[in-house]
Image (cartoon, grey):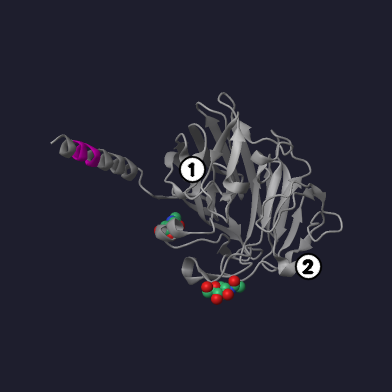
Amino acid sequence: MSKIFLLCFLAGLLLLVQAHEHDKKIRFYELKRGDFRLNLTNYGATIISVITPDKHGKLADIVLGYDSIDSYKNDAVYFGALIGRVANRIGGAKFTLDGKTYKLPANDHGNTLHGGARGFSDVVWSVKSHKKRSHVTFTYVSFENEQGFPGKLKVSVTYMLIGTRELGVRMIAKPVDKATPVNLAQHTYWNLGGHNSGDILSHIVQIFGSYITPVDKLLIPTGEIISVKGTPYDFLEPKKVRSQIQEGLYDMNYVLDKSFQKHLSKAAVVRDPVSGRKMELWSNQLGLQFYTSGQLNATKGKDGAIYNKHSGIALETQGFPDSVNYPYFPSQIVKPGEIYKHNMLYKFTAR
Ligand SMILES: *[C@@H]1O[C@H](CO)[C@@H](O)[C@H](O)[C@H]1NC(C)=O
Ligand SMILES: *[C@@H]1O[C@H](CO)[C@@H](O)[C@H](O)[C@H]1NC(C)=O
């Protein structure tokens, strides 16, 4: 009798939990100012498309993505998503904080990648406000021990239109009860020729970072911080992606030169000589992950597009990878009462 009661009780509880999950509907949110248009979704606080004109005024969508939410749910490459609680890799899928060791999901060859098996890119965010001509704000409350991380964390991201063709991204996180690592990142793949225009190998890239944090075979930092001088990673002057390394295959964290916690500084510039589109990226972060999508392989995208290796460039401002395990890397630990603030500014032009 009591067993049946318990079963009924648990089933009821499960239904309640599911109903609560379903409360948060997955929807699309448009931002639009003139011929500059974005489409976003609260699934993963994701950028689905960014439409801008080329030098002739011809519009194209310059963001890699999918046609359906189901594809975003099955995605393995984080198209357009907001990554957290800790973007990038954590070696050995664990870290120690205040004397306690935290074990995380090992979703990448024994290491943790992009917040674990179900990070912020795979949850449905709430929508706090949306004004088509100005901004959309997504919020998420990460619960204690979600993907193994300590304490509850309140997160918000605002995508806002600025001027004629600028996009601001403001990420904020506040730990409620425990200190926790926080490292959020925006993971859009850009192709300034248009998302289905082929590879980005002839894009010209400039990165304002004189140092990198080299990695081992599994992309975990070795702990060194080395100069880019004389290496294929030197993009201090604008260079074609293809010009330097193993057919343009990059996946590396740069230490940005002029990064100050509170102020924006220029992190990178990308230009496509064919369409004339240029994207400047400004940020207040210390690091920038430069990734030329070596993993893409016949990925089915929007409008029938097929994305292969080098179809897009990701420029993810953030802290350094695996900082939780390197005491001399800038700390990503945020304590209750402190506020994590990550700002990005994209400026789009064409000529
Ligand atoms: C945004 O993307 C979704 C999914 O592809 C689509 O259904 C919707 O029409 C798009 N909205 C705008 C304004 O482009
Ligand atoms: C792409 O995927 C196919 C099918 O899984 C595989 O045979 C091929 O080797 C892959 N190509 C690259 C470049 O990884």
The residue that appears at 60% across and 61% down in the rendered structure is 53
Q: Find out whether residue 184 is within the magenta segment.
A: no
Residue at numbered disc 1: 147
Q: Please state which of residues 326 and 132 is positioned toward the viewer in this rendering.
A: 326
The residue that appears at 59% across and 27% down in the rendered structure is 335
User: Could you tell me which quadrant the N terminus lies in?
Assistant: top left
Q: Main secondary structure of the magenta part?
A: helix
Vertical position of residue 306 compared to residue 133: above or below:
below
Q: What element carries label 1?
A: helix
Tell me where the magenta segment starts and ends, as one range.
Answer: 6-11
Q: Which of marks 2 and 1 is in front?
A: 1
Residue at the outermost right position = 230
Q: In the rendered structure, which amino acid carries the disc numbered 1?
A: Gln
Q: Please state which of residues 17 and 201 is positioned toward the viewer in this rendering.
A: 17
Q: Where does residue 51 sit, x and y in percent of width and height?
A: 55, 58
Residue at numbered disc 2: 243
Give the distance between the C-alpha atoms of the residues marked 2 and 1, in whole angstroms: 40 Å
Q: Is residue 164 something that shows in the picture?
A: no
The residue that appears at 54% across and 30% down in the rendered structure is 174
98 vs 211, left or right, is left
Q: Where does residue 147 sit, x and y in percent of width and height?
A: 48, 43
Q: Is residue 235 something that shows in the picture?
A: yes
Q: In the rendered structure, which amino acid carries the disc numbered 2?
A: Ser
